[in-house]
Image (cartoon, helix red, strand yellow):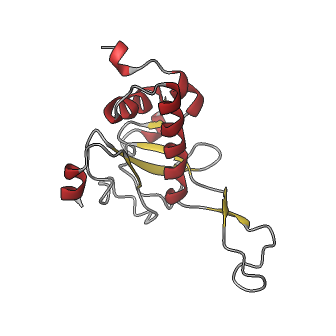
Amino acid sequence: MEDFLRANPGILFIFSAGNSGNGVLTPTCPTCYDYPHVISVSAIDQSGALTAWTNLGALLAAPGENIITSVPMKGKGAYSLESGYIFSNGASLSAPVVAAACAGRLLVHPGENHAEVREALVQSADKEDRYWGRIKNYGRVTSIGYLQFPSPRFLA
């Protein structure tokens, strides 16, 4: 995986930290790779607290509990919902939140490269002491602040 990431610096990768909830501060791979085009995400609940089941050590945290998502409609059986939507949990639901924020960022700041998109995400995150030592940046993603955050190239 690391060889693949190194060979593709032009792609922005966003990985979920996983759902082992083992309390270990060392992130599992691929979130263990610290490249300017890699963003790793742990899950938080509606109150902003890290969920008990999310893996730690990611770059940032984002909502991952009680997220509405689509499911295949199979009539009666495993998915008997007529709507095709359920509320679900998982760090894998946190990663699309960050991906959407990054896509919005590139619409507002189309000239930014992946490193600048990542740096703006890190700098604009809401820093919370409760994440200290558990999330690398000890911050959670806030889309509005992120979209409005000045381009890192102008902050240097």
Q: Position of residue 64 (x, y in %)?
A: 57, 53
The correct choice, above or below, for 134 with respect to 83 in the image is above
- In the rendered image, the quadrant that contains the C terminus is top left
Name the image quarter holding residue 37. top left
Left or right, residue 44 beside residue 21: right
The correct choice, above or below, for 128 with respect to 151 in the image is below
Q: Residue at x 25, y 53 (%)?
A: 5
Q: Residue at x 40, y 25 (%)?
A: 111
Q: Is residue 141 visible?
A: no
Name the image quarter holding residue 21. bottom left
Left or right, residue 149 beside residue 13: right
Left or right, residue 87 beside residue 103: right
- In the rendered image, the quadrant that contains the N terminus is bottom left
Q: Position of residue 96 (x, y in %)?
A: 53, 51
Q: Toward the viewer: 12 or 133?
A: 12
The correct choice, above or below, for 22 with respect to 149 in the image is below
Q: Residue at x 61, y 55 (%)?
A: 65
Q: Residue at x 71, y 78 (%)?
A: 79
Name the image quarter holding residue 110. top left
Q: Toward the viewer: 50 or 11?
A: 11
Left or right, residue 9 beside residue 49: left
Q: Toward the viewer: 7 or 23?
A: 7
Q: Position of residue 125 (x, y in %)?
A: 48, 31
